[in-house]
Amino acid sequence: MPVKKKSIEVYLDDRNKLNFTIIKEYGKFKTFSINYSAKIDDKWHAVYRADNYHGFVHEQRFWISNEPIPLPEYESVDLKDAFDMFFHKVKESHARFRKYFEEKRKNGGN
């Protein structure tokens, strides 16, 4: 089968989770997404996302805006390498991302 899709949900703990989706075509990364969600007041909130949907690599920092932030410096990078970089970024930074998101909520956002 030339196209394979894999989706994984990983709970970091009962208040933080990551969702990954990878679509490979002939063994090469074609599309990816990494989503970090936080459970706040018994509701899951999207906090951070990195992907190459819409034809370009971008991230969304939901404590700033819902708008995608284009990352043209990753357009020439192998998509598996880009996925790995964003995976490590969200793994290492999710607590900080959560803090920013909670501060935005406290100050009247979301």
Image (tube, grey):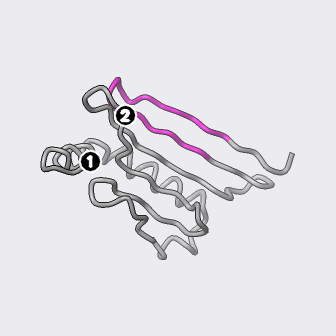
Where residue 23 appears, as percent x and y from the top left, is: 68, 50
Q: Nearer the viewer, residue 75 or 52?
A: 52
Magenta stretch secondary structure, dominant:
strand
Where residue 58 appears, as percent x and y from the top left, is: 47, 65
Name the front one of labels 1 and 2. 1
Residue type, label 1: Asn
- 10 shown above or below 98: above
* Picture residue at 45% right of the left edge, 71% below the top: 71
| Magenta stretch holds residue 20 | yes
Task: List the residue tagged with mark 2.
Answer: 44
Q: Residues within 10 Å of mark 1 (few under 14, many from 20)?
A: few
* Picture residue at 33% right of the left edge, 54% below the top: 62
Callout 1: helix, strand or loop?
loop
Q: CA distance from mark 1 to mark 2?
A: 12 Å
* Picture residue at 16% right of the left edge, 47% below the top: 103
Which mark is first along the chain, 2 or 1?
Answer: 2
Q: Which mark is residue 110?
A: 1
Q: Residue furthest right?
A: 1
Q: Which mark is residue 57?
A: none
Residue type, label 2: Trp
Q: Which segment did they paint magenta?
A: 6-21
- 55 shown above or below 91: below
Q: Is residue 80 left or right of residue 39?
A: right
* Picture residue at 26% right of the left edge, 41% below the top: 95
The quarter holding residue 46 reads top left
Q: Residues within 10 Å of mark 2 (few under 14, many from 20)?
A: few
Callout 2: helix, strand or loop?
strand
Q: Is residue 7 left or right of residue 47?
A: right
Q: Nearer the viewer, residue 105 or 61?
A: 105
